[in-house]
Image: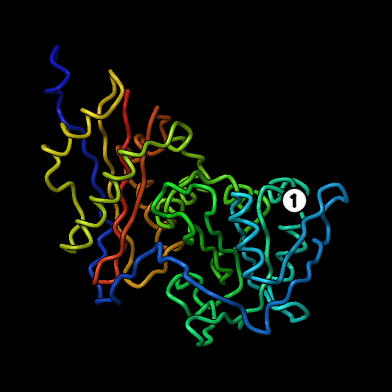
């Protein structure tokens, strides 16, 4: 067709047939941190990372407020490692085998790192609360693991917000290779970065996130994920109008392509993201879009009141 503005909209929808029980209401994935102090659990001293080469040693703060001020002042990402030292916990092995990996240590040098116990407290308006029980860290599930805050992109909605949560669970383990992916994720919200992580760690190495992340496509993916969650129905709703709207923002010659999927009810964020990517693999059409390299892309996901996460990927297909 000579008139590219009238190109046939390309949609790829997928549903894993998940129609089960209702779940909890969604929460804001990028809840802002507005904390004013720390408790006696967090002091100012620092530690080193066992296993890191001497020239790549990482300083681990254990004062949350001080680490946050450093990250903000130096415009660096802040990485929190929740782990109780000295206990027989998978997080201690994770620090030695994954965070102590030479390649991971090199990437961690760009971060302000802080290690906190699972019961670390902060003071908010004179009241003490445990960090892992706050809404901002809800997707940590109260467990050991990694959380990342963005103190780099001051003009973004996620500035000073939690943008990554990777709890250590029975199903989720983070090898040095996966940790390297986490540390190289592009700027974005918690949900955007988590879905991009799930794409990048899939065993078949899909290439849809190898191009340029696009702000407009991120907004469109977020909007459509929220809409699906609102109506509790996965699909390419209003695609005809959205298709032409999205095309108008793409570089010349690119055509919008969209994929959608949904998780099982009740899955937490990382599990749901991995599940949605796994679902796309079941369909040749979906997987062609997800595995292909596109010049621009956007991913996001949102949880509905039925406990199901709805994921959207939108690409500029050449």
Residue nearer the viewer, 1 or 145 = 145
In the image, residue 259 sits, relative to residue 127, either above or below, namely above
Q: Measuring from the top left, give residue 14's x and y in whole percent.
A: 26, 50
Q: Secondary structure at mark 1?
A: helix
Outermost residue on the right side: it is 54
Classify 10 Å Cα crowding around label 1: few (below 14), some (14-19), many (20 and above).
many
In the image, residue 309 sits, relative to residue 127, either above or below, namely above
Image point (25%, 77%), residue name: 21
Q: Which quadrant of the rendered structure holds the N terminus?
A: top left
Q: Measuring from the top left, give residue 174's x and y in whole percent.
A: 62, 59
Residue nearer the viewer, 289 or 314 = 314
From the viewer's perspective, tell me whether residue 67 is left or right of residue 249.
right
Q: Picture quarter containing residue 146?
A: bottom right
Q: Measuring from the top left, give residue 11's x and y in whole percent.
A: 21, 38
Outermost residue on the top side: it is 2
Q: Picture quarter containing residue 8?
A: top left
Q: Picture quarter containing residue 121?
A: bottom right
Image point (77%, 56%), residue name: 58
Looking at the image, how many numbered discs can be counted on the residues?
A: 1
Q: Which quadrant of the rendered structure holds the C terminus?
A: top left
Q: Which residue is mark 1?
A: 105
In the image, residue 232 sits, relative to residue 299, either above or below, namely below
Residue nearer the viewer, 40 or 82 = 40
From the viewer's perspective, tell me whether residue 246 is left or right of residue 101.
left
In the image, residue 171 sits, relative to residue 77, either above or below, namely below
Q: Measuring from the top left, give residue 15's x and y in whole percent.
A: 25, 55
């Amino acid at each position: 067709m000579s008139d590219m503005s009238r190109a046939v909209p390309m949609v790829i929808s997928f549903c894993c047939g998940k129609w089960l029980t209702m779940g909890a209401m969604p929460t804001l994935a990028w809840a802002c941190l507005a904390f004013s102090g720390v408790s006696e659990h967090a002091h100012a001293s620092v530690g080193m990372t066992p296993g890191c080469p001497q020239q790549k040693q990482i300083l681990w703060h254990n004062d949350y407020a001080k680490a946050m001020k450093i990250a903000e002042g130096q415009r660096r990402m802040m990485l929190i490692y929740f782990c109780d030292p000295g206990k027989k916990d998978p997080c201690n092995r994770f620090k030695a085998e994954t965070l102590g990996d030479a390649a991971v240590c090199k990437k961690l040098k760009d971060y302000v790192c802080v290690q906190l116990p699972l019961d670390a407290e902060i003071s908010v308006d004179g009241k003490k609360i445990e960090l892992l029980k706050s809404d901002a860290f809800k997707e940590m599930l109260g467990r050991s693991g990694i959380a990342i805050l963005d103190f780099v992109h001051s003009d973004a909605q996620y500035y000073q917000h939690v943008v990554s949560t990777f709890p250590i669970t029975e199903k989720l383990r983070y090898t040095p290779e996966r940790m390297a992916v986490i540390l190289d994720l592009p700027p974005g919200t918690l949900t955007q970065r988590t879905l991009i992580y799930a794409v990048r760690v899939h065993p078949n190495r899909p290439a849809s996130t190898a191009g340029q992340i696009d702000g407009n496509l991120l907004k469109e993916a977020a909007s459509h994920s929220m809409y699906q969650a609102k109506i509790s129905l996965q699909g390419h709703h209003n695609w005809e109008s959205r298709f032409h709207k999205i095309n108008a923002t793409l570089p010349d010659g690119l055509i919008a392509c969209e994929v959608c999927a949904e998780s099982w009810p009740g899955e937490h964020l990382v599990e749901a993201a991995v599940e949605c990517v796994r679902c796309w693999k079941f369909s040749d059409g979906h997987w062609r879009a997800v595995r292909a390299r596109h010049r621009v892309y956007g991913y996001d996901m949102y949880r509905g009141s039925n406990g199901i996460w709805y994921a959207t990927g939108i690409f500029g297909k050449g």
